[in-house]
Image (cartoon, grey):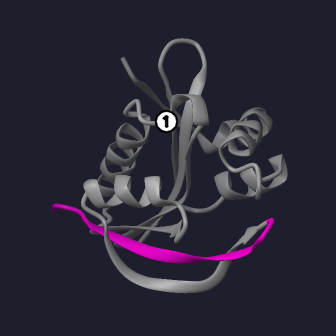
Amino acid sequence: MIELRQLHPAAATELAVSLSQLHRQCFPEDPWPPAAVQEIMALSGFFGLVASEGCDAGGFVLAQAVADEAEILSLGVVPARRRAGLGTSLLAGAATQALNRGARALFLEVAEDNMAARRLYRASGFVLVGRRINYYRRRSGCADALIMRLGLAT
């Protein structure tokens, strides 16, 4: 069974290192250092979740709600736990958290070359609404970011 634990901004100092390590496992080409995770958790409107099955964290979502919009700033599932429902659970949890904070839409950016994530987001109801050219750094160059939106029921 997948368990979602809410991240509390007051615990940012204690959580920054472990979340940074989790981020590194998910995104080895562009990992976030602990200081970046702390900064994100200090943002006004921050919310986040960690997903686990058993003892180890298998994924996370970091997001922010401002006014009637929310944005997923990062969502990752460690490679060994992919295609097991953690990403779907994290997306559903983030959408619920965003809706509870008054958001009417949830946005995210995904690398154009990340086909697995794009399929997950489309299956969850996200639609393409924009593009950022050369947004993601790659060892072999850059990849565009696709901006996607999910309307939230009110």
Most frequent secondary structure within the magenta stretch: strand
| Up/down of 153 relative to 50, above or below | below
Q: Position of residue 26 (x, y in %)?
A: 65, 44
Q: Quadrant of residue 126?
A: bottom left
Q: Is residue 147 magenta?
A: yes
Q: Which residues are magenta?
A: 139-154
Q: Which residue is mark 1?
A: 82
Foreground pick, 4 / 138: 138
Q: Position of residue 83 (x, y in %)?
A: 42, 35
Residue 81 visible at all: yes
Foreground pick, 64 / 73: 73
Q: Position of residue 30 (x, y in %)?
A: 76, 58
| Up/down of 54 relative to 114, above or below | above
Secondary structure of the residue carrying numbered label 1? loop
Q: How many marks?
A: 1
Q: Is residue 4 magenta?
A: no
Q: Position of residue 43 (x, y in %)?
A: 63, 61
Report the residue at 83% width, 52% height from top. 35
Foreground pick, 105 / 128: 128
**Mark 1, other Cα within 10 Å: few <14 / some 14–19 / many ≥20:** some
Report the residue at 56% width, 84% height from top. 132
Q: Is residue 49 left or right of residue 105?
A: right
Report the residue at 49% width, 84% height from top. 131
Give, as a three-letter code, the residue at label 1.
Arg
